[in-house]
Amino acid sequence: MKKICIYLNEYPASIEVAKELEERFHALGIETVRHDINSNAIFEGQVDFNIVVGGDGTFLKAVTLSNYSKKPFIGINTGGLGFFQEVKRHELASLVHHITVDKYTTNPTRLLKCTAYRTDGSSVEYLCVNEVLVKGLNSKVLHMDVMIGDNFLERFSGDGLIISTSIGSTAYNFSVGGAIVYPAFEIMQLSPLAPISSASYRSLLNSVVMPGRFEVILSPETKYEKGIMIVQDGTEHLIENIDRIVTTMSDVFINRLHIDEDSYWSNLRDKFI
Ligand code: NAP
């Protein structure tokens, strides 16, 4: 017997879709439970599938509120861009059928792990689906050394640096001129945000793509004692007395459910061109 959690935002279209899904699943004797993403509460129950109704922002939040559930995730777009949200509103019957007869594939998607170390040795860790952005406070230029493992890459000066996953490559990374990366590649993409390249400061102007097993170590100048901002999938965290920020792919992954494996390219075309 399957049990399904439906994560949804507050929009009327999402509530309607959730209701229709519940009716369709209940008619087949399949149990459902709703979880409002605005509750900000971790969903504690045990389910077999996670269906997310909303946009990409809802998807990102549902992943966190599921406590990084290993059960398959699939999204239904009810507004916004909805790049993660593979299923369209008129395809609910088909989705219910595919789940009921177990006709789907799942792809593991590894999350990014960003650890911020303070000067007193304490640290805080963030998991990201899309990206981590490191930027200064109050629109100040951020200067920091960038190491890839033991190798010094550059002294960056600019608004900030984005380190994105492949599935995050179509999000903020894309808006700053980064490359779109097919989700099967387990990579990290380092993209500069308004880098300064002048006689005084010289920063890479383009993105760098590297294997996910590497570590990106950012060491901001010591003058940021009031803190710098770490933005985890759109959520800001102010870190005071920062020493360094280490980002690499984590051991944590989620499984994304696909009904049509080939939909990536048509989705990309429909949403971006
Ligand atoms: P948000 O309003 O939830 O999202 C901003 C836009 O990014 C929305 O249109 C969202 O789609 C889209 N988006 C999110 N993840 C995506 C992905 N993997 N591929 C393609 N588009 C994606 O904003 P937020 O709460 O501040 O942050 C959530 C995410 O938004 C962040 O992880 C960041 O990547 C992105 N963001 C982008 C910019 C930018 O492009 N200049 C600025 C800030 C944040 P929906 O409309 O379907 O929700």
Image: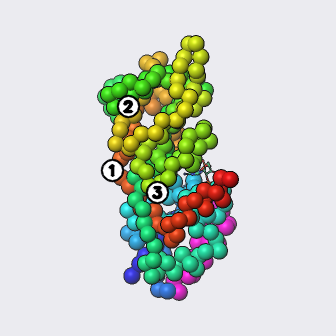
Report the amino acid beneath label 3: Val
For marks 3 and 1, the one nearer the N-term is 3
The residue depicted at 42 percent of the width and 66 percent of the height is 106
The residue that disc 2 covers is 148
C-alpha span from label 3 to label 1 = 15 Å
Is residue 155 shown in magenta? no
| Highlighted range, magenta | 10-27
Callout 3 crowding tier (Cα within 10 Å): few <14, some 14–19, many ≥20: many
Comparing marks 2 and 3, which lies closer to the viewer? 2
Q: Position of residue 240 (x, y in %)?
A: 44, 28
Q: Position of residue 162 (x, y in %)?
A: 51, 37
Report the amino acid beneath label 1: Asp
In the rendered view, how is the structure colored? rainbow
The residue depicted at 42 percent of the width and 39 percent of the height is 210
Callout 1 crowding tier (Cα within 10 Å): few <14, some 14–19, many ≥20: few
Q: Which mark is residue 63?
A: 3
The reply to whether residue 224 is visible in this rendering is no
- Is 144 in front, or is 169? 169
Residue 7, compared with residue 193, is above or below; it is below
For marks 2 and 3, the one nearer the N-term is 3
Callout 2 crowding tier (Cα within 10 Å): few <14, some 14–19, many ≥20: some
Quarter of the image where the N terminus is located = bottom left
SS majority, magenta:
helix
Q: Which mark is residue 251?
A: 1
